[in-house]
Image (cartoon, grey):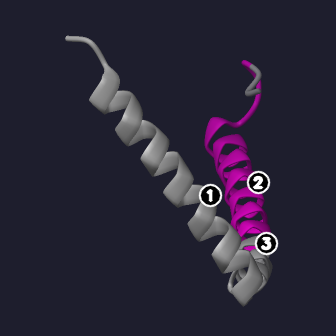
């Protein structure tokens, strides 16, 4: 990205600023998405479904571990 005739410091700083801005935008979008999904998953019906799914998975893993041959 930096050519042999380019000013190295200025080009490096420009690339660093671009990377920084992209990171800030990305993490802002992730934070907004997590906040909105948290509101969805905190509803009582969704919590019951998640708890049931996690319980089923843990039971299945426990049975698999108990029946596993050594």
Any part of residue 31 in sight: no
Which numbered disc flags the more N-terminal residue, 2 or 3?
2
Q: Which percent across, then down, holds residue 56?
A: 55, 52
Q: Which SS does the magenta portion mostly show?
A: helix
Q: Quadrant of the N terminus?
A: top right
Label 3: few (<14), some (14–19) or many (≥20) C-alpha neighbours in 10 Å: few
Q: Please identify the quarter of the rendering in which residue 27 is found.
A: bottom right
- How far is disc 2 from disc 3 in space, using C-alphas? 23 Å
Residue position for label 3: 33
Which region shows up in magenta? Answer: 4-31
| Marker disc for residue 19 | none
Q: Residue furthest left?
A: 70
Q: Is residue 64 above or below residue 25?
A: above
- How far is disc 1 from disc 2 in space, using C-alphas? 42 Å
Q: What residue is drawn where x is 76% and y is 54%?
A: 18
Q: Is residue 26 above or below residue 29?
A: above
Q: Which percent across, then down, holds residue 7?
A: 70, 37
Q: Is residue 15 above or below residue 40?
A: above
Residue position for label 1: 53
Is 52 left, or right, of 5 in this rendering? Answer: left
């Amino acid at each position: 990205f930096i050519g042999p005739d380019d000013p190295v410091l200025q080009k490096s700083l420009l690339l660093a600023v671009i990377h920084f801005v992209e990171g800030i935008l990305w993490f802002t979008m992730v934070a907004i998405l997590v906040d909105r999904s948290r509101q969805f998953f905190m509803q009582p019906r969704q919590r019951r479904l998640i708890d049931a799914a996690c319980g089923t998975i843990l039971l299945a893993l426990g049975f698999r571990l108990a029946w596993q041959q050594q």
